[in-house]
């Protein structure tokens, strides 16, 4: 692992470690796989978070490093949950969140970010506690909603991307900033695809209510 962190290459005068490169490329692959509702989303994510944990610890971004650990735990749940909700023809069944669920996500993001930022600041675990905390909470929420099969997880990812790009640049992680930008494009495409799938699933349920208990 130390070899991957210490060794790398230079792009536009900035060093990119192999750990950062591989971890972020795998993170991109995860978004691609999630868009297609593939079970491979989860094992690939486990490899990505392992590498990125080391990268962010070395960059003194405690919140962003800690989120990799939480993501790993949620990934295990998501992997299990998706295997339980697969349609033999259409793959993982997804749906749109209810109004209450959406409000709960907004509240969790606001409260979680505030609480975790204060913890990071008190422990001097991050030089940018507020955006670092927002990335942590937003990512946890996104993966949790993804595990539940809720379309809104893509919108949470857009918020994470908007916060993550400037934070990565200020941290000197330019390749990661580029990846976050690419994320945004993939996320928009994923949002469109999952909305289409959610409408199909809702229509199928309306035509055959027995599917709700099947």
Image: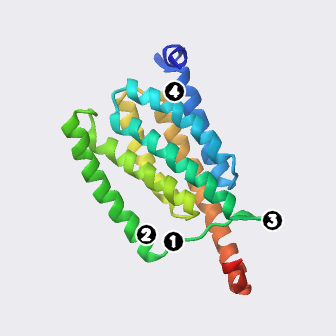
Q: For residue 205, which quarter of the picture? A: bottom right
Q: Is residue 29 visible?
A: no
Residue 102: mark: 2
Gap in angstroms between the C-alphas marked 2 and 4? 33 Å
Gap in angstroms between the C-alphas marked 3 and 1? 23 Å
Give the mark nearest the N terminus, 3 or 2: 3
Q: Which residue is mark 1?
A: 97
* Position of residue 64 measured from the top left corner of the image (x, y, whole percent): 39, 38
Q: For residue 119, which quarter of the picture? A: top left
* Position of residue 93 measured from the top left corner of the image (x, y, whole percent): 67, 66
Q: Quadrant of the C terminus?
A: bottom right
Give the mark nearest the N terminus, 3 or 4: 4
Gap in angstroms between the C-alphas marked 3 and 4? 36 Å
Describe the element under mark 2 as helix, strand or loop: helix
Is 54 above or below relative to 4?
below
Answer whether labels 2 and 1 touch (C-beta < 8 Å): yes
Residue 20: mark: 4
Q: Which residue is mark 3?
A: 89
Give the mark nearest the N terminus, 2 or 1: 1
Gap in angstroms between the C-alphas marked 3 and 2? 29 Å
Seen from the viewer's position, the closer of residues 180 and 92 is 92
């Amino acid at each position: 692992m130390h070899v991957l962190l210490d060794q790398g290459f230079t792009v536009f005068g900035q060093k990119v470690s192999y750990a950062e490169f591989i971890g972020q490329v795998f993170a991109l692959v995860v978004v691609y796989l999630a868009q297609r509702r593939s079970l491979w989303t989860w094992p690939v994510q486990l490899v990505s978070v392992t590498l990125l944990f080391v990268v962010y610890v070395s960059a003194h971004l405690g919140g962003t490093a800690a989120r990799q650990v939480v993501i790993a735990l949620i990934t295990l749940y998501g992997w299990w949950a998706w295997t339980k909700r697969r349609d033999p023809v259409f793959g993982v069944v997804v749906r749109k969140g209810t109004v209450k669920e959406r409000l709960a996500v907004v509240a969790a993001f606001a409260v979680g970010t505030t609480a975790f930022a204060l913890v990071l600041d008190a422990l001097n675990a991050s030089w940018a506690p507020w955006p670092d905390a927002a990335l942590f909470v937003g990512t946890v929420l996104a993966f949790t909603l993804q595990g539940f099969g809720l379309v809104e997880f893509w919108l949470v990812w857009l918020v994470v991307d908007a916060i993550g790009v400037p934070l990565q640049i200020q941290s000197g992680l330019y390749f990661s900033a580029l990846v976050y930008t690419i994320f945004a494009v993939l996320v928009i495409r994923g949002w469109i695809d999952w909305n289409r799938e959610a409408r199909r699933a809702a229509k199928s349920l309306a035509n055959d209510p027995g599917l709700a208990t099947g």
